[in-house]
Amino acid sequence: MPKVSDAHRRARREEILAAALRAFTAKGYQRTSMADVLAESGLSTGAIYAHFAGGKRELFVAVARTTLLRRNEELVAASSGVEPPSPGEILRIVLGGVLRDGIEPRILLQLWSEATIEPEILEMVHEAIGVVRTSFRAALERWFVQHPEYAPDGPEAAAERILPVLLGLGQGFMVQHSLFDGFDAEAYLDAATAVLPS
Amino acid sequence: MPKVSDAHRRARREEILAAALRAFTAKGYQRTSMADVLAESGLSTGAIYAHFAGGKRELFVAVARTTLLRRNEELVAASSGVEPPSPGEILRIVLGGVLRDGIEPRILLQLWSEATIEPEILEMVHEAIGVVRTSFRAALERWFVQHPEYAPDGPEAAAERILPVLLGLGQGFMVQHSLFDGFDAEAYLDAATAVLPS
DNA sequence: GTCTATAAACCGATAGAC
DNA sequence: GTCTATCGGTTTATAGAC
């Protein structure tokens, strides 16, 4: 197999995806036209369709999947240390990672909105969220094992119970970060940590 | 002033807005065409543009504003009783109202996503959220006044601190209700109530 | 105010040369 | 693989009769 050609191909794909992410972030998925992605990438119609025959939708799915799964890697890395992070710390790790990455949270709002309408996108969200959910659950369980006073009916049950709340707090963070003027991320995280067990 | 004409005008507007809400709920804001709203209302292009010159966007803003402000009325009504509701109960009242109203939470995801892009819609969301936030804050304060053990630095500060968390839990509810298969609303509310002070 | 008909713009995707 | 040029299908909004 031609290694160079393959590497070039991958590099080109990454380049296109990066341009697509910039375009989607700026104008939102729906309002971004292929012309916008073309302009952002400096390439032309044919060049892009040669790599992403699925067009706009495939670009969005690819961009979003990458973004969601990167959260997962961070969480796995952070929670495999000796001292398992508390629920509040888990939230901080994941949300902090999003911001450090320079990801505009609003792209997530757009993804959720699209998933509401397009079955193909919903499917991808289900898949990615499933992975993330599993990581959260595992991280929570590890903490509850060491703090049984918060898990009277066992770490699995306690983790399962609090999981939607933790996810909900993360989702609320994205919404408020995107929509509220002067949103105070630190205050939000402090308040969330205060209500979560620790 | 011609009272009858005015009443008719208002009735017609309500009729159009109801049709628009049905159409937006079914297909989402972006994918709903004016043709869809026309079909749903049984009226014609001219009829609608005579009442809503701003077109699709104006319809969406009007529909969303009404919906958001109704939440506020419910909360005001519920929290003016003798026994102020706890944070968990406040969440239950508002989220229960949304579902009882037959509102599809996904329309809210679409609203947030649009607000991310369209300044006019963002402005409306700011305004409506401001009203709702004020109600939440007032309701929380009333409860903290009666439970000073949770408000060491005064009810105002405690209310202000927990407000974003409560809103975040509500927003997370909408996201999960819209996107997760088999989402268990009761379990979510129970878990949220368990972490909130009561 | 409301209807029918239509214009003007735009978009995603393809065809074919190089 | 990439470029230029363009087609077919939609969409919003308007024009003009009633």
Image (spheres, coloured by chain):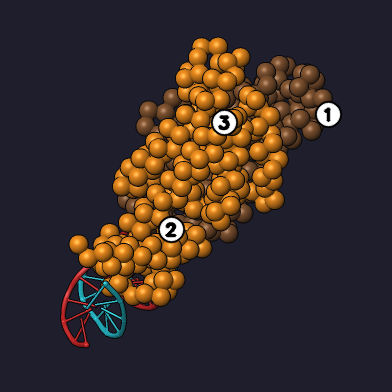
Chain colours: A brown, B orange, C cyan, D red
Residue B40 is tagged as none
According to the picture, the residue beneath numbered tag 2 turns out to be B29
Choose the circle earlier in sequence order: 2 or 3: 2
Asked whether residue A127 appears in the rendered view, the answer is: no
The mark closer to the camera, 2 or 3, is 3
Determine the residue located farthest toward the top in the rendered image: B152
Give the total of numbered labels. Answer: 3
- Nearer the observer, B25 or B90: B90
Residue A153 is tagged as 1
Instruction: Give the Cα distance between marks 1 and 2.
Output: 44 Å
Q: Amino acid at mark 2?
A: Tyr
Residue B26: x, y in percent? 51, 63
Q: Residues within 10 Å of mark 3 (few under 14, many from 20)?
A: few
Residue A178: x, y in percent? 43, 37
> In the visual, does B113 lie left or right of A165?
left
Instruction: Give the Cα distance between marks 3 and 1.
Output: 36 Å
> In the visual, does A96 lie left or right of B59?
right
The local secondary structure at tag 3 comes to: loop
Which chain letter goes with mark 3?
A: B
The local secondary structure at tag 2 comes to: loop
The local secondary structure at tag 1 comes to: loop
- Nearer the observer, C9 or B109: B109
Asked whether residue B186 appears in the rendered view, the answer is: yes
Q: Residues within 10 Å of mark 2 (few under 14, many from 20)?
A: many
> In the visual, does A124 lie left or right of A182?
right
Residue D12 placement: quadrant: bottom left
Q: Is residue B55 above or below residue B136?
A: below
Residue A129: x, y in percent? 63, 43
Q: What residue is drawn where x is 67% and y is 47%? A: B183
According to the picture, the residue beneath numbered tag 3 turns out to be B82
- Nearer the observer, A180 or B12: B12
Q: Amino acid at mark 1?
A: Asp
